[in-house]
Amino acid sequence: MSLVIVGSVAYDGVETPHGRVDRMLGGACTYIALSASYFTPVSIVGVVGDDFAQEDVDLLAGRNIDLAGLERVPGKTFFWQGVYSQDMNDRETLRTDLNVFADFQPKLPESYKSQEFLMLGNIQPGLQRQVRSQMSNPKTVGGDTMNYWIADFREELLATIKEWDFLLINDGEAKMLSGETNMRKAAAKILQMGPNTLVIKRGEYGAMLFRKDDYFIVPGYLLEQVFDPTGAGDCFAGGFIGYLAQQGISLSSGDIDRRELSRAVIYGSVMGSFCCEEFGVDRFRTLTRAEIDGRFQEFKKFTEF
Ligand code: AMP
Protein backbone atom coordinates (compact mmCIF):
# COMPACT_ATOMS: atom_id res chain seq x y z
CA MET A 1 0.00 0.00 0.00
CA SER A 2 1.18 3.53 -0.63
CA LEU A 3 2.43 5.98 1.95
CA VAL A 4 2.28 9.78 2.10
CA ILE A 5 4.99 11.49 4.18
CA VAL A 6 4.96 15.11 5.31
CA GLY A 7 7.80 16.99 6.98
CA SER A 8 10.96 19.01 6.60
CA VAL A 9 13.22 18.71 3.58
CA ALA A 10 16.38 20.47 4.62
CA TYR A 11 20.05 21.18 4.39
CA ASP A 12 21.93 20.24 7.54
CA GLY A 13 25.30 21.18 8.97
CA VAL A 14 26.45 18.43 11.31
CA GLU A 15 29.48 17.90 13.52
CA THR A 16 30.14 14.59 15.28
CA PRO A 17 33.39 13.27 16.85
CA HIS A 18 34.05 11.62 13.44
CA GLY A 19 33.89 14.70 11.31
CA ARG A 20 32.02 17.68 10.11
CA VAL A 21 29.88 18.45 7.08
CA ASP A 22 28.81 22.08 6.57
CA ARG A 23 25.90 21.41 4.26
CA MET A 24 24.23 18.20 3.19
CA LEU A 25 20.78 16.92 2.35
CA GLY A 26 18.65 16.32 5.46
CA GLY A 27 15.22 16.90 6.94
CA ALA A 28 12.83 14.54 8.69
CA CYS A 29 10.72 13.96 5.57
CA THR A 30 13.82 13.11 3.55
CA TYR A 31 15.03 10.49 6.03
CA ILE A 32 11.58 8.94 6.54
CA ALA A 33 10.99 8.75 2.80
CA LEU A 34 14.38 7.26 1.91
CA SER A 35 13.95 4.63 4.61
CA ALA A 36 10.32 3.74 3.79
CA SER A 37 11.07 3.57 0.05
CA TYR A 38 12.71 0.15 0.58
CA PHE A 39 9.32 -1.22 1.60
CA THR A 40 6.49 0.56 -0.19
CA PRO A 41 5.66 3.29 -2.74
CA VAL A 42 6.25 6.69 -1.13
CA SER A 43 4.93 10.20 -1.92
CA ILE A 44 6.27 13.25 -0.11
CA VAL A 45 4.86 16.66 0.81
CA GLY A 46 7.33 19.41 1.64
CA VAL A 47 8.84 22.67 0.51
CA VAL A 48 12.31 23.62 -0.71
CA GLY A 49 13.89 26.84 -1.97
CA ASP A 50 15.40 27.56 -5.35
CA ASP A 51 18.79 26.51 -3.95
CA PHE A 52 17.69 22.88 -3.74
CA ALA A 53 20.21 20.92 -5.80
CA GLN A 54 19.32 18.71 -8.74
CA GLU A 55 21.52 15.90 -7.36
CA ASP A 56 19.33 15.83 -4.24
CA VAL A 57 16.17 15.67 -6.36
CA ASP A 58 17.85 12.84 -8.26
CA LEU A 59 18.63 10.89 -5.10
CA LEU A 60 14.97 10.97 -4.02
CA ALA A 61 13.63 10.29 -7.51
CA GLY A 62 16.17 7.49 -7.86
CA ARG A 63 14.44 5.69 -4.99
CA ASN A 64 11.13 6.09 -6.86
CA ILE A 65 9.83 8.64 -4.37
CA ASP A 66 6.91 10.62 -5.81
CA LEU A 67 7.88 14.31 -5.68
CA ALA A 68 4.61 15.79 -6.99
CA GLY A 69 3.98 17.27 -3.51
CA LEU A 70 7.47 18.77 -3.11
CA GLU A 71 6.90 22.47 -3.68
CA ARG A 72 9.76 24.66 -4.89
CA VAL A 73 9.45 28.36 -4.02
CA PRO A 74 11.78 31.38 -4.25
CA GLY A 75 14.13 31.61 -1.28
CA LYS A 76 16.39 29.30 0.71
CA THR A 77 15.71 25.74 1.84
CA PHE A 78 15.27 25.12 5.59
CA PHE A 79 18.69 24.90 7.26
CA TRP A 80 19.51 23.14 10.52
CA GLN A 81 22.88 22.89 12.22
CA GLY A 82 23.79 20.70 15.18
CA VAL A 83 26.78 19.37 17.10
CA TYR A 84 26.91 16.03 18.92
CA SER A 85 28.46 15.18 22.29
CA GLN A 86 31.45 12.83 22.49
CA ASP A 87 29.25 9.74 23.04
CA MET A 88 26.73 11.07 20.47
CA ASN A 89 23.77 10.56 22.82
CA ASP A 90 23.20 14.31 23.07
CA ARG A 91 23.15 17.03 20.49
CA GLU A 92 22.95 20.75 20.59
CA THR A 93 21.13 22.74 17.94
CA LEU A 94 23.37 25.62 16.84
CA ARG A 95 21.14 27.08 14.18
CA THR A 96 17.62 26.70 12.78
CA ASP A 97 16.89 28.87 9.74
CA LEU A 98 13.31 28.16 8.76
CA ASN A 99 13.65 30.05 5.46
CA VAL A 100 10.93 28.85 3.03
CA PHE A 101 9.68 26.42 5.70
CA ALA A 102 8.34 29.39 7.73
CA ASP A 103 5.40 29.84 5.33
CA PHE A 104 4.88 26.16 4.60
CA GLN A 105 1.21 25.42 3.91
CA PRO A 106 1.16 21.76 2.95
CA LYS A 107 -1.06 21.03 -0.05
CA LEU A 108 -1.71 17.47 -1.10
CA PRO A 109 -1.78 16.78 -4.83
CA GLU A 110 -5.05 15.07 -5.90
CA SER A 111 -3.17 11.83 -6.51
CA TYR A 112 -2.12 11.67 -2.82
CA LYS A 113 -5.54 12.12 -1.22
CA SER A 114 -6.78 8.58 -1.58
CA GLN A 115 -3.59 6.86 -0.39
CA GLU A 116 -3.89 4.48 2.56
CA PHE A 117 -1.03 5.41 4.90
CA LEU A 118 -0.07 8.84 6.24
CA MET A 119 3.08 9.60 8.24
CA LEU A 120 3.25 13.11 9.67
CA GLY A 121 6.84 14.07 10.39
CA ASN A 122 7.75 16.52 13.11
CA ILE A 123 6.15 19.84 12.13
CA GLN A 124 3.75 22.19 13.85
CA PRO A 125 0.76 20.13 15.10
CA GLY A 126 -1.75 22.46 13.42
CA LEU A 127 -0.14 21.74 10.04
CA GLN A 128 -0.13 18.01 10.73
CA ARG A 129 -3.86 18.26 11.39
CA GLN A 130 -4.44 20.24 8.25
CA VAL A 131 -2.74 17.55 6.17
CA ARG A 132 -4.75 14.81 7.85
CA SER A 133 -7.97 16.61 6.93
CA GLN A 134 -6.98 16.69 3.24
CA MET A 135 -6.84 12.89 3.02
CA SER A 136 -10.11 11.25 2.03
CA ASN A 137 -10.09 8.09 4.12
CA PRO A 138 -6.63 6.92 5.18
CA LYS A 139 -6.41 3.50 6.82
CA THR A 140 -3.48 4.38 9.08
CA VAL A 141 -2.43 7.82 10.31
CA GLY A 142 0.31 8.73 12.74
CA GLY A 143 3.45 10.68 13.28
CA ASP A 144 6.16 12.16 15.32
CA THR A 145 6.53 15.28 17.44
CA MET A 146 9.17 16.96 19.60
CA ASN A 147 9.70 18.67 22.97
CA TYR A 148 9.03 22.16 21.60
CA TRP A 149 5.47 21.30 20.49
CA ILE A 150 4.80 19.34 23.68
CA ALA A 151 5.84 22.30 25.83
CA ASP A 152 4.45 25.28 23.91
CA PHE A 153 1.62 23.88 21.72
CA ARG A 154 0.19 21.29 24.09
CA GLU A 155 -3.53 21.79 23.41
CA GLU A 156 -3.04 21.87 19.66
CA LEU A 157 -0.86 18.77 19.85
CA LEU A 158 -3.42 16.87 21.94
CA ALA A 159 -6.20 17.73 19.47
CA THR A 160 -3.94 16.51 16.64
CA ILE A 161 -2.81 13.16 18.05
CA LYS A 162 -6.37 12.38 19.13
CA GLU A 163 -7.02 11.51 15.46
CA TRP A 164 -3.91 9.32 15.08
CA ASP A 165 -3.54 5.55 15.11
CA PHE A 166 0.12 5.63 16.11
CA LEU A 167 2.60 7.99 17.75
CA LEU A 168 6.39 7.67 17.60
CA ILE A 169 8.39 9.65 20.13
CA ASN A 170 11.56 9.30 22.19
CA ASP A 171 11.60 8.43 25.88
CA GLY A 172 12.21 11.97 27.11
CA GLU A 173 9.29 13.24 25.06
CA ALA A 174 7.03 10.44 26.33
CA LYS A 175 7.77 11.51 29.90
CA MET A 176 7.15 15.13 29.04
CA LEU A 177 3.89 14.47 27.21
CA SER A 178 2.47 12.21 29.94
CA GLY A 179 3.91 13.96 33.00
CA GLU A 180 5.01 10.50 34.26
CA THR A 181 8.57 9.38 34.91
CA ASN A 182 7.69 5.67 34.94
CA MET A 183 7.68 4.48 31.32
CA ARG A 184 4.86 2.00 31.75
CA LYS A 185 2.62 4.64 33.31
CA ALA A 186 3.69 7.16 30.69
CA ALA A 187 2.72 4.75 27.91
CA ALA A 188 -0.65 3.94 29.48
CA LYS A 189 -1.45 7.64 29.75
CA ILE A 190 -0.44 8.40 26.16
CA LEU A 191 -2.54 5.49 24.88
CA GLN A 192 -5.54 7.28 26.35
CA MET A 193 -4.80 10.40 24.30
CA GLY A 194 -5.88 8.81 21.00
CA PRO A 195 -3.27 6.57 19.35
CA ASN A 196 -3.81 2.81 19.82
CA THR A 197 -0.13 2.14 19.13
CA LEU A 198 2.78 3.95 20.75
CA VAL A 199 6.42 3.47 19.82
CA ILE A 200 8.99 4.90 22.22
CA LYS A 201 12.44 5.26 20.70
CA ARG A 202 15.41 4.98 23.04
CA GLY A 203 18.31 5.88 20.75
CA GLU A 204 21.16 3.40 20.96
CA TYR A 205 19.25 1.42 23.61
CA GLY A 206 16.46 0.33 21.28
CA ALA A 207 12.71 0.80 21.21
CA MET A 208 9.45 -0.23 22.85
CA LEU A 209 6.02 -0.68 21.33
CA PHE A 210 2.95 -0.34 23.51
CA ARG A 211 -0.69 -1.19 22.89
CA LYS A 212 -3.53 -1.41 25.36
CA ASP A 213 -2.77 -4.85 26.80
CA ASP A 214 0.55 -5.59 25.27
CA TYR A 215 4.10 -4.42 24.74
CA PHE A 216 7.21 -5.42 22.80
CA ILE A 217 10.78 -4.35 23.56
CA VAL A 218 13.85 -4.56 21.37
CA PRO A 219 17.48 -3.64 22.13
CA GLY A 220 19.46 -1.39 19.83
CA TYR A 221 21.74 -2.87 17.17
CA LEU A 222 25.34 -2.78 18.32
CA LEU A 223 27.12 -0.89 15.58
CA GLU A 224 30.90 -1.04 15.52
CA GLN A 225 31.03 2.65 14.79
CA VAL A 226 28.43 5.39 14.74
CA PHE A 227 29.39 8.19 12.36
CA ASP A 228 26.33 10.41 12.49
CA PRO A 229 23.05 9.69 14.32
CA THR A 230 21.17 12.50 12.51
CA GLY A 231 17.93 11.14 11.10
CA ALA A 232 18.09 7.79 12.89
CA GLY A 233 14.72 8.37 14.59
CA ASP A 234 13.16 9.33 11.27
CA CYS A 235 14.64 6.29 9.55
CA PHE A 236 13.21 4.17 12.34
CA ALA A 237 9.80 5.70 11.57
CA GLY A 238 10.25 5.00 7.86
CA GLY A 239 11.11 1.35 8.44
CA PHE A 240 8.26 0.88 10.91
CA ILE A 241 5.45 2.41 8.86
CA GLY A 242 6.99 1.33 5.55
CA TYR A 243 6.89 -2.31 6.61
CA LEU A 244 3.27 -2.04 7.82
CA ALA A 245 2.30 -0.45 4.50
CA GLN A 246 4.19 -3.14 2.58
CA GLN A 247 2.26 -5.82 4.44
CA GLY A 248 -1.05 -3.91 4.12
CA ILE A 249 -1.51 -3.85 7.90
CA SER A 250 -3.83 -1.08 8.98
CA LEU A 251 -3.44 0.15 12.54
CA SER A 252 -7.04 1.37 12.62
CA SER A 253 -8.40 -2.17 12.50
CA GLY A 254 -9.00 -3.88 15.83
CA ASP A 255 -7.37 -7.21 15.11
CA ILE A 256 -3.68 -6.89 14.31
CA ASP A 257 -1.15 -9.70 14.18
CA ARG A 258 1.20 -9.03 17.06
CA ARG A 259 4.15 -10.65 15.29
CA GLU A 260 3.77 -8.29 12.34
CA LEU A 261 3.84 -5.31 14.67
CA SER A 262 7.00 -6.67 16.29
CA ARG A 263 8.57 -7.15 12.85
CA ALA A 264 7.74 -3.53 12.03
CA VAL A 265 9.62 -2.44 15.18
CA ILE A 266 12.59 -4.57 14.14
CA TYR A 267 12.61 -3.11 10.61
CA GLY A 268 12.48 0.34 12.21
CA SER A 269 15.50 -0.53 14.33
CA VAL A 270 17.36 -1.95 11.32
CA MET A 271 16.80 1.23 9.29
CA GLY A 272 17.78 3.50 12.20
CA SER A 273 21.02 1.57 12.61
CA PHE A 274 21.98 1.78 8.91
CA CYS A 275 21.37 5.53 8.97
CA CYS A 276 24.11 6.02 11.59
CA GLU A 277 26.80 4.24 9.57
CA GLU A 278 27.61 7.20 7.34
CA PHE A 279 27.13 10.96 7.36
CA GLY A 280 23.68 12.33 6.54
CA VAL A 281 21.80 10.28 3.97
CA ASP A 282 24.97 8.77 2.47
CA ARG A 283 24.24 5.21 3.57
CA PHE A 284 21.12 5.27 1.38
CA ARG A 285 23.21 5.78 -1.72
CA THR A 286 24.35 2.15 -1.57
CA LEU A 287 22.01 0.33 0.84
CA THR A 288 20.17 -2.68 -0.59
CA ARG A 289 17.05 -4.53 0.53
CA ALA A 290 19.20 -7.67 0.87
CA GLU A 291 21.38 -5.90 3.46
CA ILE A 292 18.24 -4.79 5.31
CA ASP A 293 16.84 -8.31 5.42
CA GLY A 294 20.24 -9.65 6.49
CA ARG A 295 20.30 -7.35 9.50
CA PHE A 296 16.67 -8.25 10.28
CA GLN A 297 17.77 -11.90 10.52
CA GLU A 298 20.67 -10.88 12.76
CA PHE A 299 18.19 -9.19 15.10
CA LYS A 300 16.19 -12.41 15.17
CA LYS A 301 19.27 -14.39 16.16
CA PHE A 302 20.47 -12.13 18.96
CA THR A 303 17.04 -11.68 20.57
CA GLU A 304 15.95 -15.35 20.42
CA PHE A 305 15.89 -17.53 23.53
P1 AMP B 1 16.39 13.20 13.93
O1 AMP B 1 17.89 13.02 14.10
O2 AMP B 1 15.69 11.89 13.62
O3 AMP B 1 15.79 13.95 15.06
O4 AMP B 1 16.17 14.11 12.62
C1 AMP B 1 17.04 15.14 12.28
C2 AMP B 1 16.50 15.91 11.10
O5 AMP B 1 15.43 16.76 11.55
C3 AMP B 1 17.53 16.82 10.48
O6 AMP B 1 17.80 16.37 9.16
C4 AMP B 1 16.94 18.23 10.47
O7 AMP B 1 16.99 18.86 9.22
C5 AMP B 1 15.49 18.02 10.88
N1 AMP B 1 15.05 19.06 11.85
C6 AMP B 1 15.76 19.59 12.87
N2 AMP B 1 15.03 20.54 13.54
C7 AMP B 1 13.82 20.56 12.92
C8 AMP B 1 12.62 21.34 13.11
N3 AMP B 1 12.51 22.25 14.08
N4 AMP B 1 11.57 21.09 12.30
C9 AMP B 1 11.65 20.17 11.33
N5 AMP B 1 12.75 19.44 11.06
C10 AMP B 1 13.83 19.62 11.85
Image: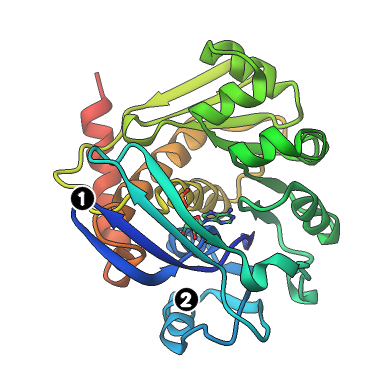
Crowding at dot 2, Cα within 10 Å, few <14 / some 14-19 / many 20+, comes out as some
- Give the vertical position of 84 relative to 34 (above or below): above
Q: Secondary structure at mark 2?
A: helix
- Give the vertical position of 191 relative to 40 (above or below): above
Residue 151 visible in the displayed image: yes
Q: Which residue is depicted at the point 58% across and 53% down?
A: 245
Q: Which mark is residue 293?
A: none
**Which amino acid type corresponds to the residue marked 2 in the rendered image?**
Leu
**Which amino acid type corresponds to the residue marked 1 in the rendered image?**
Pro
Q: CA distance from mark 2 to mark 1?
A: 28 Å
- Give the vertical position of 9 relative to 94 (above or below): below
Q: Position of residue 20 (x, y in %)?
A: 26, 62
Q: Which residue is depicted at the point 34% across and 69% down?
A: 22
Q: Which residue is depicted at the point 49% across and 27% down?
A: 171
The answer to whether mark 2 is within 8 Å of ligand 1 is no
Q: Which mark is residue 17?
A: 1
Q: Position of residue 229 (x, y in %)?
A: 33, 49
Query: Does 34 sit left or right of 241 as displayed?
Result: left
The answer to whether mark 1 is within 8 Å of ligand 1 is no
Q: Secondary structure at mark 1?
A: loop
The image quadrant that residue 220 belongs to is top left
Q: Which residue is depicted at the point 63% across and 37% down?
A: 167
The image quadrant that residue 205 belongs to is top left
Residue matched to label 2: 60
